[in-house]
Amino acid sequence: MTSIRKPVVGLLGSTGNLGSTLFHEIDQHRKNSSFVLKRIGRPEKISRDFNITPEGFITSSEGEFPDVIVNLSNSYFPNPRPEQLREMETAILGVANAISSSIKKTGCSVISASTYFQYCPTEQQPWSHYSELKNTAKEIIKTAAESCGTNFTDFVLFDNYGGLPRNKFVDFLERSLLDGVQLECTEGAQVLNLTHVNDLVAAFVSAVDELANTQGKGSQTYELKSQFTVSLRQLVDIAERASGRRASINWGAIPYREKEVFELWETGFKPPSAWRPTIEFEAYIERKFTEEVKMDIK
């Protein structure tokens, strides 16, 4: 009896926080999955199931092509040096061009991630070189998808927590709560919109399943925004209450950056109709520090 071929999904950025969490989640349920997930290696990175060829498109050594590409390849430096800028351009624009070539060659569908900084108010644009690169990358992929009549879903991401430590504010806050390490901070009035990485993964899994097994909906952009928008000071208060510990914060020790978010703007996009974040930050911190206490007792 001939087995039915499952659609093949290629994942770029499988070593990052969101990418590794997504890969783990799908891999955990691979036996019951309606598609096969494989990694894609970036140029100059370790070879994976798929690679970007010297000709500039994505395939395997056996000549297999992904039916869906999930693009979580990324690189960010706040004030990039020339060599860091080249790395950002390779990870963002180089990959976008390879995806565009793959769309034109195979008609594959694409799911990618953007940043809300791309959609800051007009008077603040461009927000950064990074946001401009992300804008350009999105347009490269979207243009190719629309010209070939294939599907492109883009998710606009805000701030997230959980998963791998990445030296973001929440990571430093957790360390301060755990070990009492002093955290140098601004006055703390800037705001974050926070979503747990597992909630973001749920949106990507749903989109992968849709595009791998249906005709899709052409080009779509959604925002993955939670209801949890707080200032840094409010975030510390919530974390202290949930953990039952005090953080050591030196408020006002460093100045605000040239561009800070003191009021969250609207992107103009809506979330996917069936998507709702389920993990609350306070419950996450409470659970994490309950587990830490249990480990200390052992």
Image (cartoon, rainbow, N blue to C red):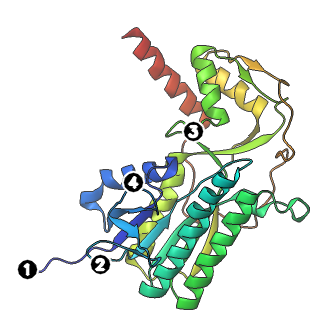
Label 1 – label 3 distance at C-alpha = 48 Å
> In front here: 79 or 152?
79
- Residue wearing tag 3: 166
Distance from Cα at disc 4 to Cα at disc 2: 23 Å
Q: Quadrant of the N terminus?
A: bottom left
* Residue at point 81%, 39% (across, down): 190
Mark 1 or mark 3, earlier in chain: 1
Seen at 56% across and 61% down, the residue is 91
| Amino acid, disc 3 | Arg
Q: Which residue is mark 1?
A: 1
Find the distance from the CA under tag 3 to the CA under tag 4. 18 Å
Tag 1 secondary structure: loop
Residue with the most extreme top position: 297
Dot 3 alpha-carbon crowd within 10 angstroms: few under 14, some 14 to 19, many 20 or more: few
**Of callouts 1 and 2, the N-terminal one:** 1
* Secondary-structure class at tag 3: loop
Q: Nearer the viewer, mark 3 or mark 4?
A: 3
User: Total marks drawn?
Assistant: 4
Disc 4 and disc 2 in contact, CB within 8 angstroms: no
The quadrant where residue 8 appears: bottom left
Could you tell me residue 284's position as x and y percent? Answer: 54, 33
